[in-house]
Image: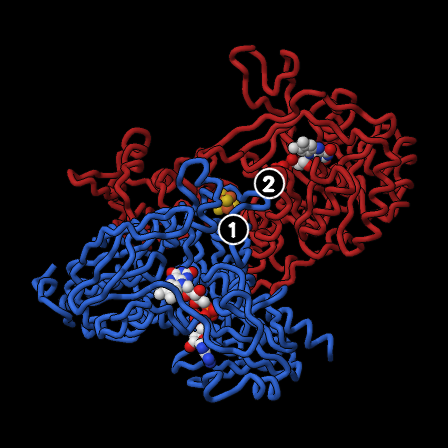
């Protein structure tokens, strides 16, 4: 059996699945039940200084759905904890005492002044928590008050606050990054310079999920008005994956542990984040959609996959896909593929035909009896037919063997590697040595 | 149908080989991976899911479906087998339309439940096809347990006991293990010798010795078993059958439906003689199975006659539909009054406050064969009874210390494969707890 346990920046956990700082980790009742359900750790809902903030008393969430009303994206305008600091601290201490093997990380957001951090850190240390996460990500409400993403968008602030934290506590410090920036490497580097033990990402993305067309107001609507919120859930996973990869690939931050967050819903999503460099993963929306029990599938699935592939530990797979994250200019232009339709699996829906005929390269033929076949002379291997086909693996991309002739270009498929940097059409091409 | 269906009297080989193969193949084709993906996608992952509550073995259905959806059918199978080691058989024979699928919220929403049974089959078949047995035994405890009766209750108990490290001797009166899985369930629900394959797979746990043709009351006694073992689990099902209680019951053409099915299950289908006109008396699953399989063997006219109203039939609406679909005629509110060599006389009935009464209107149905499916009974066991079954408290404790019972022979629960599995499992846990406490 694969070993799912992790040591993330000095924080130990029996499995890499943590609940992200959010409603699921809002209070003792939730966190106890989450641990009973098998979660490896939690990042407690963000604490602030008293007087505690207040939330709106109307709807906080908006949603985007896929087929069958599957929740794909969630938007929220909730703030940090709306309970007194002392209440949270007492609960954290009680839960940690009863669950010593689980990771207990406490998320913090206090004003951008050193006294505030000096004040809160010893209180958190006293709970026996394993680490702190600095919430530099919250994109609504708190940012209007100079906290959350208002800090996360200014690398100098990140570095400064991280340094204060490192100077005032022995606890490992994770810096949670906002995706509402242009280049995520900058804040990550700043955190690293400030002495962060790890980064976590992503927090939510600025969003308006929908507009009420009767009220002409963004949803969720509070008394006729709406404000932008933070977007999360399966829809944000690709964005989060890319940001994680960017940091993992960056030589400046290559050894900075990453806790991957954003749309993780199944064991496979988690494995993908880990492959791109995450050492732990955090989940919010999936738990909010399906309840705590999904962690059972996440654990069984991850461990089955690891066993099947002979991976023995999380450390052994973490970052394994990073070397294969390349830049466009370095992709092999000598690699030629063609779509191939498996006629036994084809259900003759014609979606590939519509997509290719109307919007791509007119490379799929259709017969009177609805047999669909790829026209190799036209196919550029764009993958759109694969993407729109409702039957998995019915259409596949088959690489052409070197030496064979691509009927589209009439050229022989070359054996070697050649990318854009050496391509004759590239004005800046360097001659291949 | 070939001319063979119109040969008078009782005859074997009414159909050609190809028809037999087709008739006795899988009633419902298994799902392939694509179908399983699409079917699993419909599950809402309900909280405290009603389907789980409806499952006598409490399989975590939303979890295993999610595991299929995330392409780990092996993990799904483990979820199933943790609760129900005969999950493969149950996926085929459970009346899901009265259990999990009836409770599914999508049955309520759209009249189309998630296909739980077929999904369970997809997951369990995946693992069984790999020949993998995803359990290993605990260290030996030095205790031995006798399990009498190798049907679903006995197999489930034996596996759970062996898992906990006990030595199990599994006795059965019959030559083959499996109980009604092997000798009773309709052939088209479990083709390709699945019952024996499943037993072989289950036995991979180790620590279970099968002793065939050992009948309690003949080759062995309860006292003897209790002396030789640390505990005894009785799972002997219901071996006896109720008789019609008519004067001409003894006629050759009057056959107990369970015996007929047993012969059918153990024979080449083309060698099983079947009448041109068949009458089945009863209203349960056995009646439906006998009638449908009579048709599948080539009987021309097959009727099920049930003494009460259709709403009282214990066969589910789906089973009744299946019978009708196979060309079986359902006649309700009629009871047999006389059996003849070539037919049965029935009298219509009225179900009133004083029970069932004949109306005096009598009709005759032509019958070369009459299959009687009006319930099974328990033989003498020397334990306290509750009604006509062994009285049990809690997880199968009988009136005698050290002896547990479960499955059809024990009181409580419906007579279903899945219930037998649950009772066997729970009794095994109780036996384990008892033996280890005393240790
Ligand atoms: C025709 C028929 C069709 C059915 N179809 C379905 C169906 O589709 N779905 C469903 O869920 N249920 C069905 N059932 C019910 C289901 O088969 C039973 O509920 C289930 O098999 C009970 O399991 P068991 O282990 O208690 O008993 P059994 O399966 O009856 O097993 C009892 C075992 O004990 C052995 N035995 C009996 N007496 C002795 C003795 N004295 N000494 C030693 N061994 C003994 C027998 O040989 C047998 O192997 C059907 C039943 C019948 C009769
Ligand atoms: C209602 C809600 C409240 C949240 N509150 C916080 C918070 O207090 N602190 C924080 O760091 N992140 C907060 N988040 C962001 C989540 O921790 C997480 O980063 C984000 O939802 C992306 O993960 P997901 O796609 O799994 O939901 C919140 C998210 C939601 C939906
Ligand atoms: S009731 Fe239906 S939808 Fe709900 S968990 Fe069970 S199978 Fe899924």
> Which secondary structure lies at badge 2?
helix
Which color has been applied to chain A in this rendered view? red
Query: Which circle marks residue B54 in the picture?
Result: 1
Q: Respond yes or no on whether mark 2 lies under 8 Å from ligand 2.
A: yes
Image location of residue B213, percent across then percent down: 42, 85
Callout 2: residue from which chain?
Answer: A
Q: Is residue A306 left or right of residue B332?
A: right
Query: Which circle marks residue B169 in the picture?
Result: none
Q: Is residue A136 left or right of residue B265?
A: right
Q: Marks 1 and 2, Cα distance to the nearest angstrom?
A: 26 Å
Name the quadrant containing residue B384: bottom right
Image location of residue B259, percent across then percent down: 31, 72
Image location of residue A147, percent across then percent down: 78, 26
Q: Nearer the viewer, residue B364 or A146?
A: B364
Residue named by callout 2: A286
Quarter of the image containing the N terminus of chain A? bottom right
Write the residue at 61% across / 63% down.
A2
Q: Nearer the viewer, residue A371 or B24?
A: B24
> Which secondary structure lies at badge 1?
helix
Which color has been applied to chain B in this rendered view? blue
């Amino acid at each position: 059996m694969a070993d799912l346990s992790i040591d993330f920046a000095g924080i130990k956990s029996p499995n890499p699945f943590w609940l992200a700082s959010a409603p699921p980790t809002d209070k003792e009742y939730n966190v106890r039940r989450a641990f009973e359900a098998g979660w490896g750790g939690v990042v407690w809902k963000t604490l602030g200084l008293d007087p505690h903030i207040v939330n709106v008393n109307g709807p906080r969430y908006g949603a985007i759905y896929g087929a069958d009303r599957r929740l794909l994206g969630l938007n929220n305008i909730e703030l940090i904890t709306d309970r007194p600091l002392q209440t949270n601290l007492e609960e954290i201490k009680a839960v940690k005492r009863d669950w010593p093997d689980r990771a207990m990380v406490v998320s913090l957001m206090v004003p951008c002044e050193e006294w505030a951090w000096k004040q809160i850190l010893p209180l958190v240390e006293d709970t026996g928590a394993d680490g702190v996460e600095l919430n530099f990500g919250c994109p609504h409400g708190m940012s209007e008050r100079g906290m959350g993403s208002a800090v996360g968008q200014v690398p100098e602030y990140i570095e400064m606050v991280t340094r204060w934290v490192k100077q005032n506590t022995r606890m490992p410090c994770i810096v949670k990054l906002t995706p509402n920036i242009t280049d995520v490497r900058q804040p990550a580097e700043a955190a690293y310079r400030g002495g962060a033990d790890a980064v976590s990402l992503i927090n939510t993305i600025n969003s308006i999920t929908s507009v009420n067309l009767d009220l002409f107001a963004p949803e969720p609507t509070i008394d006729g008005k709406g404000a932008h919120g933070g977007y999360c859930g399966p829809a944000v996973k690709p964005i989060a994956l890319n940001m994680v990869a960017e940091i993992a690939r960056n030589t400046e931050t290559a050894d900075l542990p990453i806790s991957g967050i954003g749309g993780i819903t199944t064991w496979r999503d988690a494995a993908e984040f880990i492959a791109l460099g995450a050492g732990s993963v955090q989940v919010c929306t999936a738990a909010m959609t399906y309840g705590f029990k999904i962690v059972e599938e996440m654990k069984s699935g991850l461990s089955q996959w690891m066993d099947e592939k002979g991976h023995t530990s999380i450390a052994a797979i973490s970052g394994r896909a990073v070397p294969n994250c390349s830049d466009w200019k370095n992709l092999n232009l000598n690699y030629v593929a063609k779509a191939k339709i498996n006629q036994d699996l084809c259900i003759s829906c014609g979606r590939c035909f519509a997509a290719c005929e109307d919007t791509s390269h007119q490379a799929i033929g259709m017969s009177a009896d609805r047999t669909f076949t790829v026209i190799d002379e036209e196919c550029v291997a764009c993958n759109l037919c694969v993407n729109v086909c409702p039957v998995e693996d019915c259409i596949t991309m088959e690489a052409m063997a070197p030496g064979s002739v691509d009927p589209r270009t009439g050229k022989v498929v070359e054996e070697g590697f050649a990318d854009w940097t050496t391509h004759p059409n590239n004005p800046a091409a360097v001659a291949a040595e | 149908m070939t001319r063979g269906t119109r040969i008078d009297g009782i005859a074997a080989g009414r159909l050609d080989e190809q028809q037999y193969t087709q008739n006795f193949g899988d009633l419902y084709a298994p799902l392939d991976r694509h179908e399983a993906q699409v079917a699993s996608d419909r599950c809402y992952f309900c909280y405290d899911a009603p389907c789980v509550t409806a499952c006598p073995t409490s399989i975590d259905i939303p979890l295993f479906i999610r595991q299929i959806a995330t392409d780990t059918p092996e993990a799904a199978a483990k979820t199933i087998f943790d609760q129900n080691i005969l999950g493969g058989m149950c996926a085929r024979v459970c009346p899901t339309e009265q259990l999990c699928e009836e409770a599914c919220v999508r049955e309520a929403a759209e009249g189309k439940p998630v296909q739980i049974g077929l999904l369970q089959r997809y997951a369990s078949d995946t693992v069984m096809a790999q020949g993998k047995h995803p359990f290993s035994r605990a260290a030996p405890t030095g205790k031995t347990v006798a399990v009498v009766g190798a049907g679903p209750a006995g197999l489930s108990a034996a596996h759970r006991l062996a898992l906990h490290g006990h030595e199990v001797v599994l006795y059965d009166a019959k030559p083959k293990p499996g109980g009604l899985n092997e000798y009773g369930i309709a052939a088209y629900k479990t083709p390709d010798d699945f019952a024996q394959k499943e037993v072989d797979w289950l036995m991979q746990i180790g620590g279970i010795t099968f002793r065939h043709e050992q009948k309690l009351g003949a080759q062995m006694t309860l006292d003897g078993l209790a002396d030789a073992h640390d505990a005894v689990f009785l799972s002997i099902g219901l071996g006896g059958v109720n008789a019609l209680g008519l004067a001409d019951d003894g006629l050759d053409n009057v056959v107990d439906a369970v015996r007929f099915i047993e012969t059918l299950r153990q024979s080449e289908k083309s060698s099983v003689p079947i009448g041109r006109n068949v009458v089945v008396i009863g209203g349960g699953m056995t009646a439906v199975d006998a009638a449908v399989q009579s048709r599948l063997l080539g009987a021309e006219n097959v009727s099920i006659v049930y003494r009460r109203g259709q709403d009282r039939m214990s066969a589910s609406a789906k089973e009744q539909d299946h019978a009708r679909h196979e060309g079986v005629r359902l006649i309700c509110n009629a009871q047999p009054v006389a059996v003849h060599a070539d037919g049965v006389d029935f009298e219509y009935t009225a179900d009133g406050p004083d029970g069932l009464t004949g109306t005096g209107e009598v009709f005759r149905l032509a019958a070369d064969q009459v299959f009687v499916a009006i319930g099974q009974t328990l033989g003498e066991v020397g334990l306290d009874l509750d009604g006509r079954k062994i009285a049990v408290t809690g997880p199968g404790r009988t009136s005698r210390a050290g002896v547990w019972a479960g499955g059809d022979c024990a009181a409580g629960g419906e007579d279903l494969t899945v219930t037998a599995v649950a009772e066997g499992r729970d009794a095994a846990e109780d036996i384990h707890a008892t033996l280890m406490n005393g240790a």
